[in-house]
Amino acid sequence: MLPGVGVFGTGSTARMLVPLLRGEGFEVRALWGRSEEEARSLAQELGIPFHTSQSDDVLLHPDVDLVCIYISPPLTRQIAVKALGIGKNVVCEKAATAVDAFKMVTAARYYPQLLSIVGNALRFLPAFVAMRQLLAEGYVGELQVCDARVYGPSLLDQSYGWTCEELMGGGGLHTVGSTLVDLLSHLTGARAIRVHGLLRTFVRQNGAIRGIRRVTSDDFCFFQMLMGGSGSGRGTGTGSGVCCTVTLNFNMPGAFVHEVMVVGSAGRLIARGTELYGQRNGGNGEELLLGDSEGTGQEVKDVPLPHLRGLGSMVKALKDAFQAQEERRSWVRGPVAMASTFEDGLYVQTVVEAVKRSSRSGEWESVEVMTQEPDPNQNLCEALQRNKN
Amino acid sequence: MLPGVGVFGTGSTARMLVPLLRGEGFEVRALWGRSEEEARSLAQELGIPFHTSQSDDVLLHPDVDLVCIYISPPLTRQIAVKALGIGKNVVCEKAATAVDAFKMVTAARYYPQLLSIVGNALRFLPAFVAMRQLLAEGYVGELQVCDARVYGPSLLDQSYGWTCEELMGGGGLHTVGSTLVDLLSHLTGARAIRVHGLLRTFVRQNGAIRGIRRVTSDDFCFFQMLMGGSGSGRGTGTGSGVCCTVTLNFNMPGAFVHEVMVVGSAGRLIARGTELYGQRNGGNGEELLLGDSEGTGQEVKDVPLPHLRGLGSMVKALKDAFQAQEERRSWVRGPVAMASTFEDGLYVQTVVEAVKRSSRSGEWESVEVMTQEPDPNQNLCEALQRNKN
């Protein structure tokens, strides 16, 4: 039996998610928006019976058993942790900081019977499911290099908001880079042990953001990860010693370029958008391994096609996880086993912060995943320290 | 009147160069090979009247007025400097080290009436000539990011030799990366002030190189350059503050991928192979700005098409520089003004060495172009120091 769903957020992902959920038979019972007006407007548009700007109204809603949180990063932790505490299953976006991600991990560990996943849709995209499978089967031989690039138009909202603010989780690295950090770890079965990066904000002001306001979040980012052994123990485990490079540029209006290439001793695999190509050394050039049967050119504004398609596959997996259960809140792990856990979310957030640190220091930075919550005063000291520079 | 040409080298570039020279009306009078046998074999194949393994025999040959040097980097300096001393015009490949490049600069300054260019063919490729022109005309607006990538099969020779040895100028960075360092400086009119890089040798042994022999030259290289003001004063001068990223991977058998992209505030230009594409922000997607009328698919083994085509354009420019002159050794600067000078060669070598240093130190390294020859004992100390690590 499928659970009733409460959706947090009124942005482009939430707007795409609702029809996808309905397409798989989920009932969307409630919508939360930052303001009453935003919530009402989208609820009317999508025909959602209940809307609110009070998060408790959704979390305590008796018909809501699964909560999907697609809101600004600084609010994610609070709502996700509360939802778990109330006994609801959670699919959410990344948090704003590693400390927030750590608090989410603690909550997820406390309620292991509840579903708690970070909804990185790329893991569910068929091209990457196939790529991971082929890597495990040795298509590329010994893995050497991963190279990911995403080019697209500006990620900034029309008006000033969290997307402009580095500290609120805005910017290409946090928004898109984090999905690639997660994906590369998932594909290689390894985790970054050291990272080096460079962030730039080329566009500091635009037509909508001017006067005393300035964009602090990155619109160009470039980082390298040296991968070590498996962190999660669930991957293919061949990724130790692999070099990953990621290039993000959001000063390139037009269609998104979304390309992930893995190169090994015996061949390579390349995901271009939603399609997967492969080439074996000594073979006759590139072969199409997986096309996109739904066709291309259906790009939704502001959302790369791989994310949209992946979201669809993730919703299907959610249906499979819940469907055969008698209880509305019960689920089985199998269909969503490939999802990013809150622990993965903490790892990703740790890498993102290490890349930012590296961009400031100019040096390689170690990726050390938090094992206990830092003293908040310690944190404050560091923030003050940093502001002095 | 076109000068008689002496060619040094029996590798793939020398082999391509001879027919190109003849196609423009040059007479190839003499060929030098490392061994008598290599020289004889290629001279017979190409019908060159004189061959030798003694460099002086070519340099002192009375019918040779222009010397083209395409040999292993450690031999380049010696022959180039001697050729200038004897009064011959010189087109050569890069040197092995910055110290060698510096000695070549000194010789070139001493004989300003002689032609002395580093034959980076990419500068002459019509796609890059057009890209540079469009950059100067503001097609991309304010330049922000350059991104170059070359993927291809192994650069190693069939047998063990300089291509396997980092210290002899082998490896992707030295062989191909240097042409991109030169090109990006030429395109942006700016020079790298700081670099960061990572080199890897994934394939240390193969069928031909085994036993106690190991490859030390890089087959994967990845570097970033932060560009400062103009070094040569000849560029478009808009490149200050630009980030350049270069990715080289020579573990990818099959056709070469050769792509250079420049992104600015108003649009972007992309050279894919020998073709140039552009996209203006707000425009209707990508437009083909310059096709390759000679068609593609004529890839010569071991040589990317852009190098082959660029070499053809360079030889044409050489013809134009010499043609209208009465004296066989006289030339005019105009047609070869866009060529890389020995000073540019020293800059490029300095960047290459800074990237290698960065790969060892893990830190950003400054690019400081040598202004006087270092004390050789100092050099020895540093080499000993490094070997201890």
Image (cartoon, coloured by chain):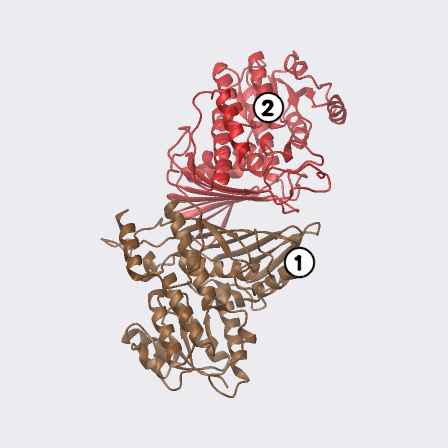
Chain colours: A red, B brown
Q: Nearer the viewer, residue B61 or B381?
A: B381
Q: Residues within 10 Å of mark 1 (few under 14, many from 20)?
A: some
- Number of numbered discs: 2
Subunit of label 2: A
Find the residue positioned furthest to the bottom.
B326
Q: Look at label 2 and name its amino acid.
A: Thr
Q: Is residue A379 left or right of residue A45?
A: left
Task: Tell me the number on the disc at residue A76.
Answer: 2
Residue at 70% x, 52% y: name it. Answer: B284
Q: Nearer the viewer, mark 1 or mark 2?
A: 1
Q: Is residue B153 visible?
A: no
Give whichever of B373, B209 is nearer the camera: B373
Where residue A342 sits: x, y (%)?
A: 50, 24
**Residue at image coords 23%, 53%:** B211
Quarter of the picture holding the N terminus of chain A: top right
- What label does residue B138 carry, if any? 1
The picture quadrant where one finds residue A193 is: top left
Amino acid under disc 1 = Gly
- Which chain letter goes with mark 1? B
Tell me the SS state at disc 2: helix
Q: Which residue is painted at 28% across and 53% down in the image?
A: B214
